[in-house]
Image (cartoon, coloured by chain):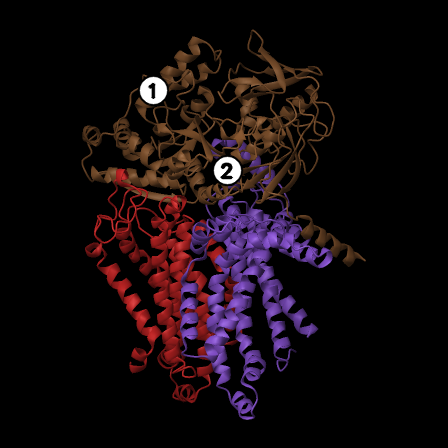
Amino acid sequence: MIRYIVRRLVQMIPLLLGISILVFLLVHLSPGDPVRMLLGEEATEEDVERLNAIYGFDLPLHIQYFRWLSNALRGNLGDSIRQGISVTTLLSERLGATLELAVVSVIIAVALGIPLGIIAAVRRGSLVDYFSMILALVGVSTPGFWLGLMLLTHVALKVDWLPMFGRDGSIFGGLWILITQMRVDVLLEGLRHVLLPAVSIGTGMMAIVTRLTRSSMLEVLGKDYIRTAKAKGLNNQVVVLKHALRNALLPVITIIGIQFGAMLGGAVVTETVFAWPGVGRLIVNAIRQRDFPIIQGGVLMMAVVFALVNLAVDISYALVNPRIRYD
Amino acid sequence: MKQFLRNKSAVTGTIIVGILIITAIFADAIAPKDPYQMDIWESFRPPEGLRGEYILGTDDMGRDVLSRIIVGSRISLLVAIIATGVSLVFGVTLGAIAGYVGGITDAIIMRIMDLILAFPSILLAIAIVASLGPGVVNAMLAIAIVRIPAMVRVTRSMVLSLREEDFVAAAQALGLSHTRILFRHILVNCYAPILVVATLNMGTAITVEATLSFLGLGAQPPIISWGRMLALGREAIRTAPHITVFPGLAIVFTTLGFNLLGDGLRDISDPQLRGR
Amino acid sequence: MRIRLFLVALLVMVVGLGGIANASSDTLVIGSGAEAVGLDPRLETDVPSFERINVIMEPLVKFDVEMNLVPALATDWEFSDDALTLTFYLREGVKWHDGKPFTAEDVKYTFEWVLDPSNAAPNRGLYADIDRIEVVNDHVVSFHLGKPYSFLLNNIARMPITPAHDGDREDFRQAPIGTGPYKLVQWTRDDRMVLAANDEYWGGKPNIPNLVFRAIPENATRLLAFEAGEIDIYQGGVVPQELPRLESDPRFVVQRVPGTGYNYLGFNTQVGALSDVRVRQAINYLINREGIVTRVLNNIGTPGIGPIPETLPWFNPDVQRYEYNPEKAKELLKEAGYGPGDISLRLFTNENPDRVRIAEILQFEAQQIGVKIEVFVEEWGAYLSRVQETDDFDIFILGWAGQLDPDRAMIRQFHTDGANNYGKYSNERLDYLLEYGRTVPPDSQESIEIYREAQEIVVREVPYGFINYSEEVGLHHNYIKNWRVHPYGAGAWQDVHLIVKER
């Protein structure tokens, strides 16, 4: 198992190198000059040249890249051109918000999607089945940012308890306070704020999870060993929950992993709509400002997180299904 | 065919996609008004219903929202077809080569796909469009690139499983060229899952285009795109919600159509799930 | 042990940012359209940054809400007779947030830092005429100029003073101290900036103990948050279509004042059809200014006339006016030898919705008289590069803000060698006037005459088509008292210590 994890981690290295080169080229070959963005509409040519020299943008591309790489290997992703702060700081202070939003979205998606999928599969052809399938299809077809706008005007405006924007404290922190001090207020405050953005992002994923759970369950329920179990007179519920579900969840876990990655970056527009202080917003603003080090570091971090999540998914396979072995 | 007609998703999806195609082709004839005609003195008229002058109201520049939605279907359909088409051509070719040739070629192709997959797709699309410059063509290209890996994976796995089949061995024994075997014998046998993925991709393409246009990176004026309608209408979402609600519903509706169709096709093509 | 320390640090990081009370009576919550880039006035260029900086720090002199220069850290100032020395008399008894006294050394430090070419100060050009800064004593400081520059004072008003003893601290940009009414307490970027009253403030103890800035990029979301009471007040980015409703709602107060900027069409005066002044004039006649102002901007702003805001004394009301007139445009094109279908132009703008709308309207109007305009909406970075670095465009839409004097409003834009003369416009007489104007005392009749003539030239020759003058809109709940909207967004909160929250 450990050898497997190490091998996977080693395999990540060329991938990350490739990504860093790709992003570097994409960013540096695109029109738009970070120094001009910084100086704005009032730039003078003299100032542009002076600052380009200060930031090293007048050097050949490959030298710039190796400079960046050698710093990155030492854990230094450079400083934001516009804000002058280290990119690692900028990313780490937003990572919490992004992970929080992604985690809550996944929880919403899983908590609603899996039961709905199971019920739909067990009661195939029933009203519940139709309802959940329609919900699922509409869910995947709805752009998250549009759903967000609709939630703001149709839900948040009418329900006083729900705020319009922003984040207020971390829910991870809230949980910690709940455990250590038996106080629920901080957690509630955090949840209140994360709810609507998480629903806007989570709906699409919930739809995917529902569909997949249903079809996966249907497949497993048709297998011989389930029929055998039923024939042996085992309680229907036990069969469904214990035997079928465990196997049916495998593909669902894969998709959760993939979707989790998509969520990290795909939440960009939703983050803007709800003024959520996340990484996606940072990177998109950086793309607009041509703040090269942020784009470079941010995308790399996304890729790392994504790769780690997928690794975690593969490992959890083994936990759900002990028959799978790694070597 | 019978299976197709019996599958409710497929039929509903076909009807919706059919409506979309007909709307797009005959947009000029169907649209009650000139979608480009501005009259800023008539801006922000609320929906007036079927008997009113502006059935779904007017937008921020006094243009007829219904007509713009109707004409906007063209760009959505175009993006769906072209972006998916491009990803289909590249994805199937690369996937087939990877699966059939195997070895280092396979490894290289799949590592490149991993590279693309390692980016969150929306972010990659934004980055591509930002570097190529905004516009509907570049948006299509970005969407196509982002969707290629899915095509490659499906094709590759199909080819891998078919490669070992007897008829392939037979063809190879007959001395047929690899290209011929690949395209005439293998690929024709795996069109079904590819078609399913392509159909589902079309739905995704429409939402991605809307997202890019919402960020101002997609279609440029005067091209009418639903995403751009949303982007320009969103500020006035309180006083004139119809400008954002209806194009949004149009996006949901058409994406739904492609997804239903794709779902239906999958049910039909997957013998394991047939009839369920 | 290491790991344990790390875990504790992680917990503190996560837990430490626990809930901070919103919108209670001892906290003023200000909405803002964007997060500050940083808080060092020597490095920032954007309005959202200065909105916040001007609460923490102060310049020597500042513009009040009537746009008069009034004392801030300097109580008095004077030019020498040869106009080559500008002397400031500093306020005594002012303390930095850390208790150290504010002196002339701080002034010298700030401007010398900006003038040092090895520092990345973007706005160095504004102060380039300063040769030497002399500390006369703790409370008197003199700026010695290489050549007379009449409007230097306005530029000095844009630069809050930073502390000499603390300004080189590595994280000064993120956690600065100043002399202003509020001290920075905590800043979570893209989320909130928390400040506390500076009870020692020379202008009097602030009325509200806590101040919070919230960055909300979407105008619609910011308004919703305002109406829900999650923010108390904001200036700028008020959704125009909502104004009538907000103005009639007794719970809210809308304040409006003419701004300091304008939107314009910039023409490439060197390439193709637009090198003919008649074609530029023709396009200028196609701008439906009244329609744009009333319907696109919902009456925020006024139809554009020339480069100088109407509120400045140099404004020339007698220049030629270009009323919307497609017939006249057609005639001019005919005169220039162009018939319908002969001209095809490429218009660029960024994704600012108002600009896109204006572009679409112009495109439509032009089409009616047989001029084809292709609109390209570019992403801001690419757009700015195109306009500044290339001449690969026919028309672009941009805006200027902070046009506080005629020099700032014209020399960079219309002088042959102007840094922002993107359309490569050139007129010898105008060059002369703009150079000469800098050496004439700003409050003299001569200064007014020089710039009135300059405006006539610019309006006649149309390097720009002026679309609209801006207007600043501030929005607050009715329980907020003692605040007035500022004509320049960056100064919106400079008198925030006077605000009262009656709730």
Residue under circle 2?
A36
**Which chain is indicated by disc 2?**
A
Chain represented in purple: A
Rendering quarter of residue C209: top right
Rendering quarter of residue C128: top right
For this orientation, the residue located farthest to the right is: C1
Q: What element carries label 2?
A: helix
Give the residue type at disc 1: Ile
Residue beneath the point at 26% across and 37% down: B41
Q: Can residue C351 be seen in this view?
A: yes
Residue under circle 1?
C457
Image quarter where the C terminus of chain C lies is top right
Most foreground residue, C471 or C123: C471
* Count of numbered marks: 2
- In this picture, residue C285 sits left or right of residue A227: left
Looking at the image, is B221 positioned above or below residue C494? below
Residue C350 % position (x, y):
41, 41
Which color has been applied to chain C in this rendered view? brown
